[in-house]
Amino acid sequence: KERDHEVLSFLAAYCENIPESSARWVHIGMTSYDLVDTSLGHTLARATDLLTTAGRRLRRVLADLAVEHWDTVIVGRTHGIHAEPTTFGHKLAGFAFAVDRSLQRLAAAREAVAVGTVSGP
């Protein structure tokens, strides 16, 4: 309400605990979009890091269970009805490979979003 601009309000709050001699340099030479875009890139990179860590754990668990149950016979299905028998391990291995492909795509997405912009006014 005081500043009528979300970025300026954020900067005012951010700079409250920074000495004035340093605070004046936080936004110098940057447009508001530079600050917002760079912050968003950083936030998205951190979020993908969290997802990657969890995804790697999931992939490891699926792979371990696939090996453990490689010979565990289960009913195969096609179009929701019974089909040829398969193994639980084989099914889990398919899930592990799917998670692996998703992790590769997530890594590429992280590289694309983890950028900053400082083009200035």
Image (tube, rainbow, N blue to C red):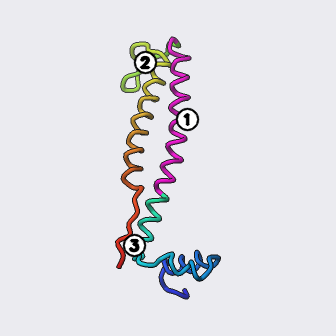
Q: Point out residue 13 in the picture as x, y percentages from the top left corner.
A: 59, 78
> Could you classify mark 2 by the number of other residues whose Cα lies within 10 Å: few (under 14), some (14-19), or many (20 or more)?
some
Q: CA distance from mark 2 to mark 1?
A: 27 Å
Q: Are marks 3 and 2 in contact (CB under 8 Å)?
A: no
Please name the residue shown 55% across and 88% down the image. Answer: 2
Q: Secondary structure at mark 3?
A: helix
Q: Is residue 117 above or below residue 97?
A: below
Q: Point out residue 56 in the picture as x, y percentages from the top left corner.
A: 51, 36
Kindly give the residue lying farthest to the bottom in the view shown.
2
State the residue in front, 75 or 120.
Answer: 120
Q: Label 3 belongs to which residue?
A: 33
Which portion, as a residue range, is magenta?
44-71
Residue 107 in the figure: left or right of residue 26? left
What is the number of the mark on residue 57? 1
Q: Is residue 106 magenta?
A: no
> Could you classify mark 1 by the number of other residues whose Cα lies within 10 Å: few (under 14), some (14-19), or many (20 or more)?
few
